[in-house]
Image (cartoon, rainbow, N blue to C red):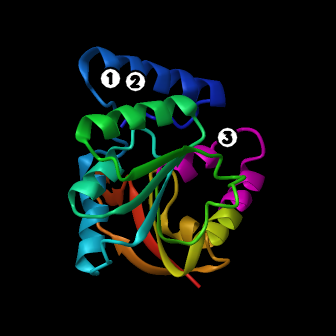
Amino acid sequence: ISSPFFCSDSSWDAAYERELQTFQDIGDSGEIWFGEESMVRIIRWLEKHKVPLDSSVLDIGTGNGVLLVEMAKSGYMNLTGIDYSPSAIQLSEKVREKEGMSNIKLKVEDFLAPSAELSGFDICIDKGTFDAISLDPRDAVGKRKLYVGSLRRVLKPEGFFLITSCNWTKEELLNEFREGFEILEELPTPKFCFGGRIGNSVTALVFQRK
C-alpha cells in the first residue's frame, strides 16, 4: 500500500476531502486500508469465535466506513465509527447512505480525548489509526500512551481489540498494549521474502481487555 501515515492533521482532512469529491463525482468510496483481505480477516475471526451479532463495535479511525458496511452486510447490528476528520465522517455517511445501512452510527471524535458517551464497547477495531498516531512527529510516545488509556476506557472488561498494523511487529505491539490487555491470537497475514528471510509486512493481533 502507499503510506499515508506521515500526514499532518490538515493533510488528512485534505485527503478525505478529495475522496469525498471523488465519491460525489463517480461513486468511488476510496482506498481500503490494507486491502479487502484485512476486512475479511476481521469478520472471519468474529464469525469463527461466534461473537454475537448484537455486540457493540467501535471502528477507531473509520475513514470511509467501508469496514462497518461490510460488517453490517454480515449481520452485525450495533456499529459505530469515529474519525477526527469531519471530511472522513462526511464520506462515510455518503457511503452508508449509498449502501442503505442506516443502523451504522458515525461521529467526529478524537480518540485521544474521547467524549464520555464513547464507552462500553464489546469490540474495538483499528486498521492503521494507531500507526498514524505512532508516526506523529509531535510527541508520538505521549500520544501512544493516550491511545492505550482511551482504549481501556471505551472497551469493556473482557472485550476484544483487533488491530492491524504495518509499522509494528507483534512483539512491539505486545509491549505497547501490555497494560490492561492480553494477547489472544495473531491472525495470518500475507508473507514476503527478502534476502532469503520470510517476514510479514502487516501484523494483525487480537487482544482482550483484562
Q: Which label lies toward us, 2 or 1? A: 1
Between discs 1 and 3, the one toward the N terminus: 1
Circle on res. 19: 2
Badge 2 density bin: few <14, some 14–19, many ≥20, Cα 10 Å: many
Badge 1 density bin: few <14, some 14–19, many ≥20, Cα 10 Å: some
What residue would you read off at disc 1? 23
Does 120 appear in magenta?
no
Q: Which residues are magenta?
A: 127-147
Marks 2 and 3 close (CB-CB < 8 Å): no
x, y percent for residue 43: 27, 64
Q: Where is 79 relative to 44, above or below?
A: above
Judged left or right of residue 17, residue 9 is right
Marks 2 and 1 close (CB-CB < 8 Å): yes
Residue found at the far front of this picture? 102
x, y percent for residue 97: 31, 36
Three-letter residue code for mark 1: Phe
Q: Main secondary structure of the magenta part?
A: helix
Cα–Cα gap, marks 1 and 3: 28 Å
Cα–Cα gap, marks 2 and 3: 22 Å
What residue would you read off at disc 3? 136
Residue at x 29%, y 71% (from the top left corner): 45
Judged left or right of residue 207, residue 142 is right
Three-letter residue code for mark 2: Glu
Q: Quadrant of the C terminus?
A: bottom right
x, y percent for residue 74: 21, 61
